[in-house]
Amino acid sequence: MMTSEMRETSPPIAAGVWIAVISSFINGSTFVLQKKGILRSRKRGGSYLKDGVWWSGTLSMIAGQIGNFLAYNAAPAVVVTPLGALGVLFGAVLASYILQEQLNVLGKLGCVLCCCGSVVLIIHSPKSESVTSSLELEERLADPVFVAYSSLVVLLLVVLMVWVAPAHGTSNIMVYVSICSLLGSFTVTSCKGLGLAAQDAFSGGPSSSRALGLFLGLLGTLSVSILIQFTFINKALEHYSSNMFEAIYYVAFTSTVLTASAILFREWTTVGLVDCLGMLCGLTTVAVGVLLLRISSEASLTWKPAATGPDKMD
């Protein structure tokens, strides 16, 4: 019995892993191509909305998001999310060739530590309980703790977007990173929920109308979250290196997704001492990696004006 169940569930999980790997490489190219398009349009004095390279990066982002949606519905998030580290490393290599954003030794070490720390954090994070129907998902979404968490995230997003970003977005990368990563609480949750809601919404059963409402609500939330993320990602790429933004964004995005998932599925009660220590080690490794990236970026900005003069890259 167990063997037959494994045979039934293994192919979808394997397919989800392969989709996640391909999506990670596609996602790794998006920031680099969009940054290249922004630089090309800035040099010409026009809008990046008219640049073909920028649009290729935008289409890559759409393809990567579709791949992520399929992967999250075919395999557990704890398997899919660590594979995003492949995109960070691929993006760093691609940026060195296309954008000439050469990371120094500290930058390379920081990028690797961010990826390794995030993977360790994901491995030791609490695992999702299985939710098999839209009714179960509705119950979880209506839980007072998750509602309070969602309300707090929305409040933080409003403060960041309305007051903090206009004043400090161009001088502190964490402003744009925080906005984009906090939205991950809604995008990944919506992606995981859409698959469940769609099964009941289009089945024609007695609860199909209620499931359809949930499906449309999740779809609307996903669309708005992606559009806002898209806007602030491009704002970040106008002012910061794609290498640095992608590495820190992956770390922050992973952390917020894990937090939202743990609250939604009430997973913290299952975390043992070993997992707590593992997550602490992962967070420490990530913090060191981010610190090295910041030091590397500051050293690069200090060196570039003297070395390249007016032709320096943002």
Image (cartoon, rainbow, N blue to C red):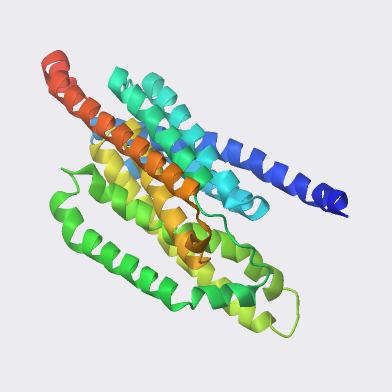
Measuring from the top left, give residue 182's x and y in whole percent.
36, 57
When the figure is inspected, residue 217 is found, relative to residue 278, above or below; the finding is below
When the figure is inspected, residue 31 is found, relative to residue 109, above or below; the finding is below
Q: Nearer the viewer, residue 51 or 236?
A: 236
When the figure is inspected, residue 101 is found, relative to residue 229, above or below; the finding is above
- The quadrant in which the C terminus is found is top left
Query: Residue, x 60% and y 62% (percent of image)?
Result: 129
- The quadrant in which the N terminus is found is bottom right
Tell me if 254 is positioned left or right of 191 in this view.
left
Tell me if 309 is positioned left or right of 211 in this view.
left
Measuring from the top left, give residue 80's x and y in whole percent.
58, 45
Query: Residue, x 50% and y 46% (percent of image)?
Result: 124
Residue extending farthest to the bottom is: 206
When the figure is inspected, residue 3 is found, relative to residue 120, above or below; the finding is below
Tell me if 10 is positioned left or right of 93 in this view.
right
Determine which quarter of the picture holds residue 53: top left
Residue extending farthest to the front is: 273
Q: Evaluate whether residue 3 shows in this view.
A: yes
Query: Residue, x 65% and y 83% (percent of image)?
Result: 209
Measuring from the top left, give residue 46's x and y in whole percent.
27, 39
Tell me if 132 is positioned left or right of 227 in this view.
right
